[in-house]
Amino acid sequence: MEDTRKTHILVIDDSDASRELLVELLEAEGDYIVHDAVDARSGFAQFQEHDVELVLLDVMLPDESGFNLCKRMKSARAGFLPIIMVTALNSVSDKVRGLEAGADDFITKPILREELLARSRSHLRTKRMVDRVDRYREELSRFNQRLQEEVHMRTRQLQKTMAELKRAKEDVELTRVEIVERLGIASEYRDEETGRHVQRMSRFVYELSLAYGLPEETAEIYRLAAPMHDIGKMGVRDYVLLKPAQLEEGEVELIKQHTIIGARILANPRTELMVIAQQMARSHHERWDGQGYPDGLRGDAIPLPARICTVADVFDAVTSGRVYRPAPMSVEEAVEEVNRGAGSRFDPKVVEAFSRSIDRLVQVFREVEKW
């Protein structure tokens, strides 16, 4: 039984003396199992049968040149296979042919033991190093493949998770928006128009905010906050809120309380949306000239969300029917009403934004009325 732990070497030479000398010198080392053949045909058969790690190949063979056999063996074996050409030829052109055929080294006859063993050991060490590198590359390739598969799987899982989170975030956002809108509707529910005022106010505020020059993200927050500007009306009694006639002085004071009530309902806000909603609820009846309520704020002391909300609220109020004013103004009359209030009732810059956006506001009004 062959000792598979030893290195297999193949010697192919048609000269019995040369072949037997090579076999004898290599086997004497005790580390090698040496196979030999006298021609290309039998040599290639042994090469295929055994796990040969080094080939000593004569150039002149009876059935095929050693150069051609070298090419065939190199092509047939994956990985590095050292082949040493053993030849009596010593011309440069013969060595070039050998190198072009894939030979790794040359030993010139007559054979010297020390040179044979030194070159054999050197090429076997090189082969083992190359084999280790090849195994490392194969392992690295398999690792990379597994890593790519793992990354692909994790990426798909992450994409799925992100999609689920996105849907959850959208659901939360829709729920938040719906809650805000329904709070606004609840505050207006006792009026005949119910939720249409809330719808119009939200979109009026949005359009005015954009025309004023605010970023779209900020305008969207203003839009969401606007339905809560009159939430304090929930604390005002029906006989005052729905009175079709002129309010008495005491009743006016009760109506004014809806700003304070709204601010209390929205007290201690923890998000930007609720901060803005509270500002709108408390200060949308403040006036630019300081004659408004509940705090008598003047000019820029009035929060911007409230200043924008005020213009939107007045425009909607004068163009819509109310229990205390059944006949709404025309758009032209409403525009004049707002323009007259610039610098006294309203922030002049907000009125300028109003003038720039009037066409959009009218379009919004018509769209909501269709609903």
Image (cartoon, helix red, strand yellow):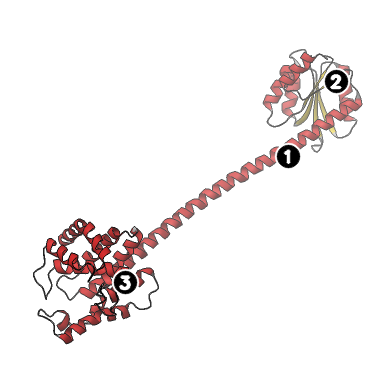
Q: Horizontal and vertical percent for residue 267?
A: 35, 78
Asked if the residues shown at circle 1 and circle 3 are in contact, with their CB atoms under 8 angstroms apart, the answer is no
Q: Which residue is mark 2?
A: 19
Sequence-earlier tag: 2 or 3 = 2
Circle 2: element type: helix
Mark whose residue sits in front, 1 or 3: 3
Query: Which residue: 11% across, 76% down?
Result: 324
The residue closer to the viewer here, 319 or 151, is 319
For the N terminus, the image quarter is: top right
Residue count near mark 1 (Cα–Cα under 10 Å), binned few <14, some 14–19, many ≥20: few
Sequence-earlier tag: 1 or 2 = 2
Asked if the residues shown at circle 2 and circle 3 are in contact, with their CB atoms under 8 angstroms apart, the answer is no
Q: Is 362 situated above or below 82?
A: below
Residue count near mark 2 (Cα–Cα under 10 Å), binned few <14, some 14–19, many ≥20: some
Circle 1: element type: helix
Left of 76 or right of it: where is 170?
left
Left of 269 or right of it: where is 331?
left
Q: Horizontal and vertical percent for residue 317?
A: 17, 69
Q: Which mark is residue 243?
A: none
Q: Horizontal and vertical percent for residue 287?
A: 25, 74
Q: Which residue is mark 1?
A: 132
The residue closer to the viewer here, 153 or 163, is 163
Query: Which residue: 69% across, 28% down?
Result: 77
Q: CA distance from mark 1 to mark 3?
A: 71 Å
